[in-house]
Amino acid sequence: MDFAERVLKLMPEGAYFMLAKAQAMEASGRHVIHLELGQPDVTASENISQAGIDAIEEGFTRYTPSAGIPALRKVIAEDASRRRGIPIEPAQVVVGPGAKPALFFPTLALVRPGDEVIYPDPGFPTYAAMIDVAGGTPVPVPLREEEDFSFNLEAFDRLVNDHTRMVVLNSPSNPTGGVMPLAALEHIAEVARQRDLWVLSDEIYARLVYDQPASSIASLPGMAERTIICDGFSKTYAMTGWRLGYGIMPRLLAERVELLLTHSVGCTASFTQVAGIEAITGPQEHVEAVVAEYKRRRDALVAGLNDIPGVRCRMPQGAFYVFPNVTAFGCSSNWLAEYLLEETGVAVLPGTSFGKNGEGYLRLCFANSLENSLEALERMKPALAAAALGTLKGGGK
């Protein structure tokens, strides 16, 4: 078929592709351990679920304003103001069905054909996709293992030019778990102010940190008026299927993004938004307990991976992913991920699902139970030992 150019570069998201393969194996009777999908193994806490049920029973099943119900926009603004230390008004908040609209629609509103957008590589696949669809030019900046997967600032400085329109940040990062140090954010902020750039800061994992808080670039001087914050409920509150996210941005941009929502999805389900109010204003002990459990799983998984000859894994500072280096095996990340799935029944993602700079790495999600993670390690050890000895069958070496 003769498709419009804007969709020709769109590719499947790697996690869903690997999930489909894993589910096909399960349908044939294999037991698969799922470490490929970035989804908490817990569900939303009881008070959140009950708030959603109550909302349906009370008739919150009708259209809402496209930018979200006023009560939710208000509590998001208050919560975000407190956590980031900057004044945020409800008019700056735009609610959407998931966080992706807060990535895609500001990009559509700001990026013009020929504009360049700098984004992290390896990084979330939607970044390159949204830039392409907007008619911009994606410009990847490498995240280096030796820099704890922060932006390579030397490369960033080389890539910024008169055509640069926007910089995309993600801290804590998917897929690496890296948290950008304040000094790196300050460097990028200075460049953004000097060159009048927009910054789209994906902070969906901001509360999933283990050693120190993740700073927001929007909190730095002169950055609130040029930063779009993307956040949501899926990761922090285990509400992936509820489809509830939001963007925080300057008011005039919020008005444009609201129009894009009006003419695309219309609005977000009202009962989901009511549950979101309860998530923010209700008890937070559930979130704190989940973060503590993730840290326990992280520590065990990193230790287990580093015990496998040929694997080198840094300790992630945030999110719920580990990103081990597997270059010692001499085969592509994609081949090794498929080999592990077929030989061991452990589903992981190749680093190249997140860009060319992900070659030589795998992404494993530890939002699965500790028991499953430990079993996955036991399954992987002999298979990777075979790889280290060069006894793999097929085209791995």
Image (spheres, helix red, strand yellow):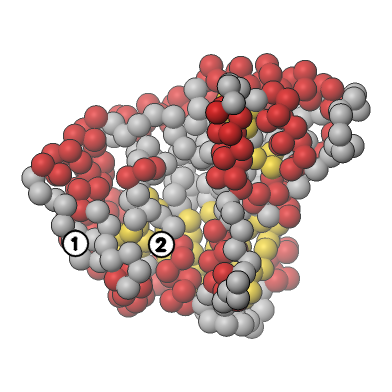
From where the camera sits, is residue 357 visible? Answer: yes
Between residues 183 and 283, which one lies in front from this camera angle? 283
Q: Amino acid at mark 1?
A: Thr
Q: Quadrant of the C terminus?
A: top right
- In the image, residue 16 sits, relative to residue 264, either above or below, namely above
> Which residue is depicted at the point 23% across and 51% down?
273
Quarter of the view holding residue 55: top left
Viewer-nearest residue: 396 or 236: 396
| Measured Cα–Cα span from mark 2 to mark 1 | 17 Å
Q: Secondary structure at mark 2?
A: helix
Q: Position of residue 251 (x, y in %)?
A: 31, 73
Q: Which residue is mark 2?
A: 101
Q: Amino acid at mark 2?
A: Pro
Residue occupying the point 54% across, 58% down: 126
Mark 1 = which residue?
64
> Residue 73, relative to residue 371: is it above or below?
below
Which numbered dot is residue 355? none
Task: Give me the residue at 44% from left, 58% from top.
Answer: 100
| Label 2 packing within 10 angstroms: few (<14), some (14-19), many (20+) | many
Label 1 element class: loop
Left or right of 333 on screen, residue 255: left
Location of residue 111 in the rendering, given as x and y in whole percent from the top left corner: 52, 77
